[in-house]
Every structure is written in structure tokens, then in C-alpha cells.
Image (spheres, rainbow, N blue to C red):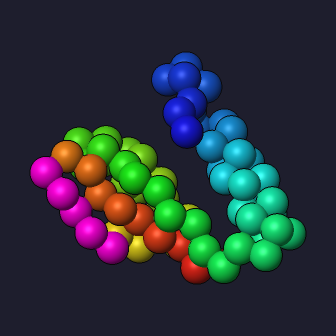
């Protein structure tokens, strides 16, 4: 997921993540995994703020998980 720089801080990413989360729950999923580029510290913090934990980190990407 990406939000154009000029539109950040308006809740768009949080809204999209909310829709994804609700759909996952409705479809019986128990968690969400995602990859984030480790240099994208803003995204890493966004997901951490939304209850994702970093499970693994490679050279360039981190695997993050949120239990539903």
C-alpha cells in the first residue's frame, strides 16, 4: 500500500488498512502478514502504530504480522 506524499496524514492509509482488516476477519482469517522495505521508516512506524509486530528482518525487507 502507498499513499501519495501530498495526501499523507489524512487517514487514507488507516482507512484502507481498516477495510483490509475487516475483510480478512469476515473471511475467517486470523492474521495479516506484510513486507515493508526497511528504509521506509514511516511505513514501519505506521504499521507498528497499527498493532503489527516485526517478525523477521532481511537485508532490505521486514516481515510484519498482526493477529486478528
**Residue 50: image location, x then y, percent:** 56, 65
Residue sitting at the far front: 28
Q: Quadrant of residue 42?
A: top left
Is 7 or 54 nearer to us in this picture? Answer: 54
| Residue 8 visible, this angle | yes
Residue sitting at the far left: 59
**Residue 35: image location, x then y, percent:** 40, 53
| Residue 49 visible, this angle | no
**Is 25 left or right of 40, judged from the image as shown?**
right
**Is 8 left or right of 59, judged from the image as shown?**
right
**Residue 40: image location, x then y, percent:** 31, 42
Q: Main secondary structure of the magenta part?
A: strand
The vertical placement of 52 against 37, above or below, is below
Q: Quadrant of residue 21?
A: bottom right
Residue at 58 percent across and 66 percent down: it is: 32
**Residue 14: image location, x then y, percent:** 66, 50
What quarter of the picture does the C terminus occupy?
bottom right
What quarter of the picture does the N terminus occupy?
top right
The vertical placement of 16 against 5, above or below, is below
Residue at 72 percent across and 55 percent down: it is: 20
Residue at 50 percent across and 64 percent down: it is: 33
**Is 13 left or right of 35, judged from the image as shown?**
right
Residue sitting at the far right: 26
Write the start and end of the magenta stretch as one range.
55-59
| Numbered label tally | 0
The vertical placement of 31 against 59, above or below, is below
Residue at 71 percent across and 74 percent down: it is: 29
Per the image, is 47 magenta?
no
Amino acid at each position: 500500500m502507498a499513499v501519495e506524499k501530498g495526501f499523507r496524514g489524512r487517514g487514507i492509509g488507516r482507512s484502507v488498512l481498516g477495510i483490509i482488516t475487516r475483510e480478512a476477519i469476515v473471511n475467517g482469517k486470523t492474521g495479516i502478514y506484510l513486507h515493508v522495505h526497511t528504509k521506509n521508516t514511516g511505513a514501519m512506524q505506521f504499521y507498528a502504530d497499527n498493532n503489527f509486530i516485526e517478525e523477521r528482518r532481511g537485508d532490505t525487507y521486514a516481515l510484519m504480522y498482526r493477529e486478528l
